[in-house]
Image (cartoon, rainbow, N blue to C red):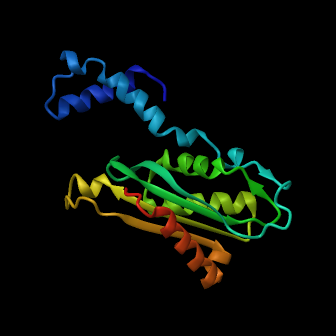
Amino acid sequence: MEHNESSTYLVKRMLEHIGEDANREGLRETPQRVVKAWGEWFSGYGQDPAEVLKVFEDGSENYDQMVLVSNIPVYSKCEHHCADIFGLAHVAYIPNGKIVGLSKANRVVDIFARRLQVQERLTANIADAINDNLTPLGVGVVLQCRHMCMESRGVNTRGTVTTTSAMRGVFLEDAAAKSELLRLIDGARNGISI
């Protein structure tokens, strides 16, 4: 996000709107810092998940079992209040002749999380990107997140975790595959709190 006068002016006006003196020492540089932070928080708009999902056929010979990357940190902003969403993502796929570097699941989660989101869309975006680019036998994505729009305002319900899932292919069609995925996620989460 570019630092320009109109962006910093808007932040300054917002500070004044809440009753602050935007010219006091502690806030003089805040508009520039906010614009810079937004550039980082919303950098996902400038990234294409297809570019990070480089696939390999070498190494996938005869491998048709689940690959699960668990406990991927999620940091996003809700599109309704620009409030924080944070938690964990669990991303699984069953190869169909192609595999992807393990860190790519983290990258795909981050690309979509760094956009204004609702958790349901975020979950589906991740699953669809992996499904469309790897053409696996199945994709399963589970997100477990807390929403500050619900915890710090409105109902003020602290510690509530929202779980969403997106299943494609085998994970949608085969109850045993889905059950195995959920059991593995539960085991990976053992002792990890959001």
Furthest-left residue in view?
Answer: 19
Name which residue lies at 29% across and 63% down. 160
Q: In this view, does 8 lie to the left or right of 126?
A: left
Q: Is residue 156 above or below residue 12?
A: below
Q: In this view, does 134 lie above or below 16?
A: below
Name which residue lies at 75% across and 48% down. 54
Instruction: Give the image location of residue 173, x and y in percent.
Output: 65, 82
In the image, 83 versus 62, the foreground residue is 62
Q: How many labels does the image show?
A: 0
Instruction: Give the image location of residue 189, x and y in percent.
Output: 46, 63
Instruction: Give the image location of residue 59, x and y in percent.
Output: 83, 56
Quadrant housing residue 34: top left
In the image, 111 versus 72, the foreground residue is 72
Name which residue lies at 32% across and 29% down. 10
In the image, 13 versus 54, the foreground residue is 54
Name which residue lies at 27% across and 58% down. 150
Placement of the C terminus among the 4 image quadrants:
bottom left
Q: Is residue 107 left or right of residue 35?
A: right
Quadrant housing residue 58: bottom right
Furthest-bottom residue in view?
Answer: 175
Furthest-front residue in view?
Answer: 191
